[in-house]
Amino acid sequence: NAGVTQTPKFQVLKTGQSMTLQCAQDMNHNSMYWYRQDPGMGLRLIYYSASEGTTDKGEVPNGYNVSRLNKREFSLRLESAAPSQTSVYFCASSPAGLAGNTIYFGEGSWLTVV
Amino acid sequence: KNQVEQSPQSLIILEGKNCTLQCNYTVSPFSNLRWYKQDTGRGPVSLTIMTFSENTKSNGRYTATLDADTKQSSLHITASQLSDSASYICVVSASGYSTLTFGKGTMLLVSP
């Protein structure tokens, strides 16, 4: 089972460039999330989608946009990358929200902005 | 402010030994507490999830405890193996849809 699949695995961007991180899940989950993980910090929520057709800001949404393309896919876009966005990005999904549900994470996307 | 503090930051133990990792939280109102294992270069994988009414839960050699009164949790690893080398992350959920507070993790190294 693939679970949560993220692409690309690694990416180097120049400041000001744009890019989209892709995420797909094959578990028929309703809810999907994008987190970033920085050294010395816990994971922080960027955006989430409670269900197909809805998206909401998380803790650190500035500089990002998201699209819930369909039930399976949730993409994260950096319109004008900045060095502060150098991080590891994790997509995740859960059956329906967070209450008591296990959250399944992808393998991560390493992004470096120079 | 919701916070999750984990200790120790890092730990080295010999293969076959037991260890206990600690998690203290100030998340309110409490909904549930999760422990995740994150191998280097990989995504976090769920070990346990406990609600307010549960005070212990096991997953193989991993046993998590929860004291909701003192707002403390521990993760006990029995008979450690080299494959247990990873970061262990405590995550607390507050009531409400999007609120998860992640600890910074404890980095465990199991040495042969």
Image (spheres, coloured by chain):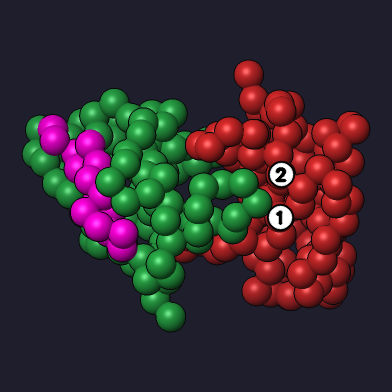
Chain colours: A green, B red
Which residue is depicted at the point 25% across and 57% down?
A: A70
Whether residue A84 appears in this view of the structure is yes
Task: Point out the stretch of residues depicted in magenta.
Answer: A65-80
Report the chain holding disc 2.
B
Q: Crowdedness of circle 2 by 10 Å Cα count: few (<14), some, many (20+)?
A: many
The answer to whether B37 is drawn above or below residue B82 in the figure is above
- Which numbered disc flags the more N-terminal residue, 2 or 1? 2
Q: Are marks 2 and 1 in contact (CB under 8 Å)?
A: yes
Q: Position of residue B32 (x, y in %)?
A: 71, 44
Q: Is residue B81 magenta?
A: no
Is residue B106 in view from this perspective?
Answer: no
Residue B32 disc label: 2
When the figure is inspected, residue B95 is found, relative to residue A72, above or below; the finding is above
Same chain for the residues under marks 2 and 1 in the image = yes
Query: Could you say whether the residue bearing mark 2 is in a helix, strand or loop?
Result: strand
Residue B96, how many percent across, how many down? 58, 33
Q: Is residue B103 left or right of residue A60?
A: right
Q: Position of residue B34 (x, y in %)?
A: 68, 50
Indicate the position of residue B12 as horizontal and vertical percent values.
74, 57
Q: Quadrant of the N terminus of chain B?
A: top right
Q: Which residue is mark 1?
A: B49
Q: Quadrant of residue B47?
A: bottom right
Q: What residue sits 39% from the left and 76% below the top?
A: A2
Whether A84 is drawn above or below A30: the answer is above
Instruction: Specify the amino acid type for callout 2.
Output: Asn
- Viewer-closest of A12 and A29: A29
What's the amino acid at mark 1?
Ile
Location of residue B82 (image quadrant): bottom right
